Image (tube, coloured by chain):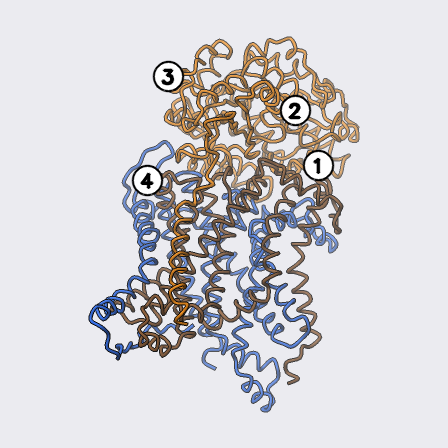
Amino acid sequence: MTNWSPTVFTRVMLGVAVLLSAFPLYWMLVIASRTNADAVAVPPPFLPGGNLGENIVAVLNNEDAKFLLGLTNSFVVASIVTVSVVIISTLAGFSFANLAFKGKNVLLLLVLLTMAVPLQQMGVVPLYRLMVSMEWTGTLKAVILPYLLNGFGVFLMTQYTRQAVPMELVEAARVDGAATLRIWWNVVLPAVRPGMAVLGINTFMLMWNDFMWPLIVLTPDNPTVQIAITSLNARFSTNYTLIFAGTALSIIPLIAVFVVFGRQIVGGLMEGAVKA
Amino acid sequence: MSLDTLPRTARTPRRDHPPGRRWRSRVDVKAMPYVLVSPYFLLFAAFGLFPLAFTLYYSLYDYDLAGTTEWTGLGNYAALLVDEDFWNAVVNTVGMFVLATVPQMLLALFLANALNKRFRLRLAIRMSVLLPLVTSVVAVAVVFTQLFARDWGLVNYILSWFGVDATNWRAERIPSWLAIATMVDWRWTGYNAIIFLAGMQTIPRDLYEAAAIDGASRRRQFWQITLPMLRPTMIFVVLNSTIGGLTLFSEPTTFYNGNVDGGSQGQFQTVAMFIVKQGFREFDYGYAAAAAWLLFLLILIGALVNFLVVRRIGGTK
Amino acid sequence: MLISKRRGMAAATALAAATLAVASCGSGSGSSEPTSSGPVTIRVQTFGGGSNFGYKNAITKWNAEHKDIQIKEEHLTDQFEQQYWPQMIQWLTSGTGAGDVVGIDEGGMGLAKAHPEWWADLKEHGLESRKADFPAWKWENGVTADGKLFGLGTDIGGMSLCYRKDLFEKAGLPTDRDEVGALWPTWDDFLKVGQQFQAKVKDSKWADGTNTLYQVVLYQEAAKNGNVTYFDQQNNLIVDKNAAVRTAFDFAQKLTEQGLTAKLRNFTDEWAAGIQKGSFATLGCPSWMLGAVSDNAGEDGKGKWDVASVPGGGGNWGGSWLAVPKQSKHPKEAAMVADYLTQAQTEASIFTDFGNMPSNVKAQQDPAVQSAKNEFFNDAPIGEIFAKSAASLQPVFLGVKHAQVKSAIESVVQGMDDGSVAYDKAWQQLVDDAVKAAG
C-alpha cells in the first residue's frame, strides 16, 4: 500500500493549497484590523493591527451600511429557497425514480433541458417587468420566487433516489397498504437524506452568493448581504477599514457553520457527488 | 451520473382491499406521481416558461429611454450580430472562461490526487481547501480588488521585487482577465478537487494494484486509470463550470466597484454584464432580451464543446 | 415504522404549509414602510465625492429643530453618470427605491425634464414662490414642458484649479495663488509648467488624470461655441461638429501624451487616495470639487492645498437640483426639506463650510458668501473666486441624454490615459461611442 502514502511533493502541494485558500481571508482580517492610511500604504501591511473591534463596531453602528439587515435578509432568502427546493426536488425525484406514470420520460427530459438554461440570467427582462407590475421590486419575494425552480435539484434527487431506494422497498411498503406520500415519508426520506444535504448546501450557497438578480431587483434599503457590501463599497469607497470589516462580518457566520458542520458537509458533498 | 431515464416497471399490489380503499388506492397510484412532480412544473410554468417566452417577445421590440416602444422584428438580433461591444463581451467571457477553467481543472485534479493519499489532519485539510466556497463572492472580490490595486496592491508590490512595473489590472485587458480568473479559481478549485476526490474513491483499488504489479509508474497509473475512470465526474464538473463561467457576473462587476461597464473600454465586461447594462443601465429591454437568447446559445455551444472534449480525454484508451 | 406514520405525515404537511406561508410573506421585511405615528423620515439621496452636496451640517441643524420631520441623507455613490443616475432611472420607472428628495446633476436634467410623470409638482406645495431666488436659467431647467415645477437649484460649478502648495514648492514653483495663476495665461503654458514640475518632482504627477481638466476646457470652450457641448438646442448630437469638444479632447490628449497625469479618474477610490497621498499636484476644481478634495485629503491635507484661477476664461461645469419623486410617500414634507436645503441661508452656509457655490441669488449676494475664505485651502478667498463670477455665468445647454453621452465620452478620454485606447484611434472612437450612447 505504499502507493497511498504521500510524497514530499504532495505534502508541499497540499500545504500551498491550504495557505492559498486561507490567504485572502487572512488579508481581509489584516485590512479590517488596521486604519485607512495603512490600507493604501506601500509597502502593504503584512500583519493584523489592533483596530478590528473598533472597525466592526463602526460598521454595525453605521445606519447606511444596513449590515445586519443584509445578513438577516440573506439568511431568510437562502433558507426559504433551500427548504422549498429540497422538498420540491425530493418529491419529484421520488416520483421520477420510483413511481410509474405516463409521460414520465418526456417530463424528465424537460427537467434535463431546463437545467441547461440559466433562467435567472436569461429571463431577467420579463422577470423584472413582472416584479415591477406586481409592485414586488425591493422585496425579498422578488428574489425568492424565481429561484424556487431548480432543475438541477430535481435531477440530482431523481438520480440519488434511484440509487438509494431499492424498488423492492417501495413495493413492499405498497403491499403493506401504505399510500404514496407515506412511502415517501417513511421509506424514501430516511434513505435520501445525504442527497438532500448536498442539494441543501448547494442551494444555500447559491442563494447566499446570488448577486446579479438582487442587484437588479432590490434597493440598498432592503439588501441581501452581497448588495449590502456592494453599496458599502459604493458609498464609502475610500473607507477601506469599514468595507473590510463589513466583508469580514459577512462571511463569519458562514465560516462558523462550516467549522461546526465541516465533517458532514465534506462527507455529504463527496457522497452526493458520487451517487448522483 | 447515469443518464438513463427508463421507468422501472411497477407491479400492481397483490393483496385485496375493501372497495373504497381500493378506489382510493388506485387514485393514489395513478394520480400521486403527477401530484408529486406538479410543484416543480407549476413553478416552471410561472418562472421558467413565462420568462423564456416573454424574453422572446421583448426581444422583438425596440425600447428607448425616452419611453417609446417600437416593433423591430429581428432588428435587435441583427444589430447585436454587428455590435462590437457585444462581441467584445463574448470574447471577454470566453477568454476569461478558458483562462479560469483550464488551470482550474488541472489544479483540481492534481489536488484531488494529493488529497487521496493517506495523511494526518485529512479532514482539516479537506475543509481548508473548501473554505473559499463558504465565503461570499462579493466579499472575496472586494479583497482581491484591493490585492490587485495599481498603486498599493500586494500583487504589484510583490511583482516590484522582480522589477516588474506597476500593472494597472483594471485597465489592461489580459491582466484584468488574469485577475478575475484568479478570483474564480480561488473559489472553485478546492470544491472541484473534492468532487474529483469523491470520484477517485469509487475507483476500485485492485485496478491500481494490478497496474503496479505490471510495473506501471504512479504517473502512468494516474493517466491511464484515474483519468479515464473519472470521466463521468469530469463531465459533471465541466458542465457546471461552463454554465457558471459563461454567466460570470459577480467577480468582474465587483472588480469595477459595482459597475457593469467592466473597465473604461469594457476590457472585462462579460455577456451577463452586457445584458444588465443594456437592460438596466440603458433601459433597452429588447436589446437585453435578444442578448440573453444569444447567451443561451453560447452556453449550449460551450456545453457541447466541453462535453465532446471531456469525452475524448482518456476515452478511447 | 407504522406507529410514526401518522405523526410523520402531519409533520410533513405542516412543514410544507409553513414553507409556503413563509414564502408568501417573504416580503415582510420590505423597505421602510411609512408609519402613521412618530416622526416622518425624509430620505435625501445624493452623489459625489467627499462632502458631496455639503448637507451634513444643514441636516444636523434641521433635525435638531424639527422633531416631527427627520432628514436622513443617503449618499449612494461618488459617480453620477456611471452609477447613480442609471440606478435612479430604474427606481423612478419601477416605482420603488428612490428617496423622498433626490439630487440630480445637470447632466440628468434633460431626461428628468422629459419625464414629468416621475416627479411630484412642487407648485402644489407652494414652491412657485421661490422663483425670484434663482437665476432664470436655473429655475427654468427645473420646470417641465407642461409647466410642472420639479427641481430646485442647489449649486453651480464655477471654475478654478486646485493645487498642492507643498509640491509646487518642491518643484521650485511659486506657491502664492496669484503668482500661480499668472504662471499659466493659456493651457499651453499650463502644459509647459507641468513639464518643469515633473522635471523636478519625480514621485508625483502634474495632474490627476485627463478627465477633470478635459471638463474644465470643455465648458470654457462651450461658452465660445454657442453654450452647447454634446447636443445642440434641438437635441441633435453634435459631438463631431462642436469645436469645443475637439479642443477639449485635443488638450486631454496632449496632457496624457506628455505623461503629465497620474492616470486617475476622478471619483474613483484610487483618485481619492491620490489626493490624500499627493500623487498629483493639480486638478480641475468647480466649486463643488473643493469639498471632495478637502474631505478626501483629511486633516493632514489642511493648508497643503490652495485654489488658483484656470488658464483661459471662466465657465460653469456642474451644479445640481433637488427633486421630489412622485413615488415619495411624504411629498409635502419632502417639498419642505427641498425648500429648506435650497434656501439662501442654507446654501450660504454650505458654501462657507464646504465650498459648493450657491445657485440661490440671495445667497450669492450674501456678504458672508462674498467674503468667504476656505480654511482647508490655506484660507483661499473662495467668495472672491466663485461668487464674484457667479452672476455672469452662462448656462450651458445639455441634451436629454447628456449623462449617457458624457459617460461614454469620459470613458474614452480616460481610456487614452490608462492606455486602453490608442491615441490615433481615440477621436473616432469618442465620436462612435457618443453616437451609440445617444441611441
**What's the residue at 30%, 66% (across, down)?**
B33
Q: Which chain contains the residue that carries disc 2?
A: C
Tell me which corner region of the image, top left, top right, bottom left or bottom right, holds residue C156: top right
| Image marks 1 and 2: residues in contact by CB distance under 8 Å | no
Q: Which of pointers 3 and 4 indicates the residue nearer the eye?
A: 3
Q: Which mark is residue B62?
A: 4
Establish whether labels 3 and 4 are both on one chain. Answer: no
Q: Which mark is residue C12?
A: none
Distance of label 4 from label 1 (alpha carbons): 46 Å
* Spot occupied by residue A31 in the image (x, y as percentages of width and height): 69, 47
Q: The chain drawn blue is chain what?
A: B
* Spot occupied by residue B37 in the image (x, y as percentages of width and height): 32, 62
The shade of chain C is: orange
| Image marks 3 and 4: residues in contact by CB distance under 8 Å | no
Establish whether labels 1 and 2 are both on one chain. Answer: yes
Secondary structure beneath dot 1 equals loop
Q: Which chain contains the residue that carries disc 1?
A: C
Q: The chain drawn brown is chain what?
A: A
| Image marks 3 and 2: residues in contact by CB distance under 8 Å | no
Residue lying furthest bottom: B213
Query: Looking at the rendering, in which quadrant would you find the N terminus of chain B?
Result: bottom left
Pointer 2: what residue? C161
Q: Amino acid at mark 4?
A: Asp
Establish whether labels 3 and 1 are both on one chain. Answer: yes
| Image marks 4 and 1: residues in contact by CB distance under 8 Å | no
Q: Which of pointers 3 and 1 indicates the residue nearer the eye?
A: 3
